[in-house]
C-alpha cells in the first residue's frame, strides 16, 4: 500500500528564515509521481511541483527547491528566505501510475506559519 | 493552465436534505474526475474516482448510496450528498485529469458543506 508521511505537523519560523518540509513515502511501484501542493487559508490547492520516479535531479524554482532521494524515499521541500505569504498548509502526495487511475495519496500536511 | 470549477463554493443545509455539488473542467475534457473530502485540519482523502459514462469507483469506507456520483459528460461530474447529516460537514474538493497533460490532475477550488 502507498503511504506518504509528513512528520512535521506544524512549523513556525520568523520571516527570512529558511525552512524545510519533510516528506517520506512508501510504494511498491517502480514508476510513480511525487507532488507538492500548497493550500492557503482560502482552501484551494495550488500545484507546486511534480517529479517522476526516474528523475532524481533536484529542482529549484525561485525561493523553492526540492530534494528527491530515492535511496531514502524522501522528497523534501525547502523555502529559502521565507515570507509571510508562504504561510499555508503544504501537502506532499504520491500517485501510483500516470496512465491509469492516477489516485493521489496525500500526506497529513504541514502547517507552516511565517511570522513577521 | 487547465481550470476546474466547482459550484457552489459553499452551502449550508438542514439535516436530512440532499446537496448537489458540481465539478466542471472548463478548458479540457476530463475522462476521469476525482472527489476528495477534507475535514478541518486534516488531509485530503479520496472518496471516489468518477469515469465518464461509467459507474464511479468508491474508496473503502465510502457509502456509495450516500455519496452519489454522476459523470455524464467529459466536462461535468456531480457529487450528491443524500440525506446529509452534521457529520457530513466538510470541505469537498474535486479534481479532473487532463489526458493531454501527462494525465495531470487539476483541482477545483472546493465546496464547503455545513449541515445544521
Image (tube, coloured by chain):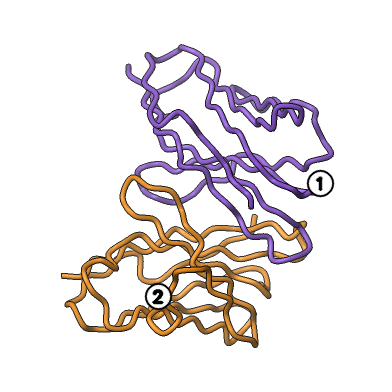
Chain colours: A purple, B orange
Chain for mark 1?
A: A
SS class of the residue under badge 2?
strand
Q: Are marks 2 and 1 on the same chain?
A: no
The x, y position of residue B39, in whole percent, is 34, 55
Give the number of callouts: 2
Q: Which residue is mark 2?
A: B21
Chain for mark 2?
A: B
Looking at the image, which residue is at 63% across and 39% down?
Answer: A25
Distance between the alpha carbons at the discs numbered 2 and 1: 36 Å
Q: Quadrant of the C terminus of chain A?
A: top left
The numbered dot on residue A95 is none
Looking at the image, which residue is at 61% across and 27% down?
Answer: A76
Looking at the image, which residue is at 75% across and 58% down?
Answer: B101
SS class of the residue under badge 1?
loop
User: From the viewer's perspective, is residue B83 above or below residue A98?
Assistant: below
Q: Crowdedness of circle 1 by 10 Å Cα count: few (<14), some, many (20+)?
A: few
Q: Which residue is mark 1?
A: A30
Looking at the image, which residue is at 44% across and 58% down?
Answer: B109
The x, y position of residue A112, in whole percent, is 40, 29
The x, y position of residue A83, in whole percent, is 44, 21
Horizontal side of residue B83 vs A111, given as left or right: left
The x, y position of residue A111, in whole percent, is 39, 33
Horizontal side of residue A49 vs B16, given as left or right: right
Between label 2 and label 1, give the one nearer the viewer: 1
Amino acid at each position: 500500500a502507498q503511504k506518504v508521511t509528513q512528520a512535521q505537523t506544524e512549523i513556525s519560523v520568523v520571516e527570512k528564515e529558511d525552512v524545510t518540509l519533510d516528506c517520506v513515502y512508501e510504494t511498491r511501484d517502480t514508476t510513480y509521481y511525487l507532488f507538492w501542493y500548497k493550500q492557503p487559508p482560502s482552501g484551494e490547492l495550488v500545484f507546486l511541483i511534480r517529479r517522476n520516479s526516474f528523475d532524481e535531479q533536484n529542482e529549484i524554482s525561485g525561493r523553492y527547491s526540492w530534494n528527491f532521494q530515492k535511496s531514502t524515499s524522501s522528497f523534501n521541500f525547502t523555502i529559502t528566505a521565507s515570507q509571510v505569504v508562504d504561510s499555508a498548509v503544504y501537502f506532499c502526495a504520491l500517485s501510483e501510475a500516470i496512465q491509469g487511475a492516477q489516485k493521489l495519496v496525500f500526506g497529513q500536511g504541514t502547517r507552516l506559519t511565517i511570522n513577521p | 493552465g487547465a481550470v476546474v470549477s466547482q459550484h457552489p463554493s459553499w452551502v449550508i443545509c438542514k439535516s436530512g436534505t440532499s446537496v448537489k455539488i458540481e465539478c466542471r473542467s472548463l478548458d479540457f475534457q476530463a475522462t476521469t474526475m476525482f472527489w476528495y473530502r477534507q475535514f478541518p485540519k486534516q488531509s485530503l482523502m479520496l472518496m471516489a474516482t468518477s469515469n465518464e459514462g461509467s459507474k464511479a469507483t468508491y474508496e473503502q469506507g465510502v457509502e456509495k448510496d450516500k455519496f452519489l456520483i454522476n459523470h455524464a459528460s467529459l466536462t461535468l461530474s456531480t457529487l450528491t450528498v443524500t440525506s446529509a447529516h452534521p457529520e457530513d460537514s466538510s470541505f469537498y474538493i474535486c479534481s479532473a485529469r487532463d489526458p493531454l497533460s501527462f494525465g495531470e490532475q487539476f483541482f477545483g477550488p472546493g465546496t464547503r458543506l455545513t449541515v445544521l
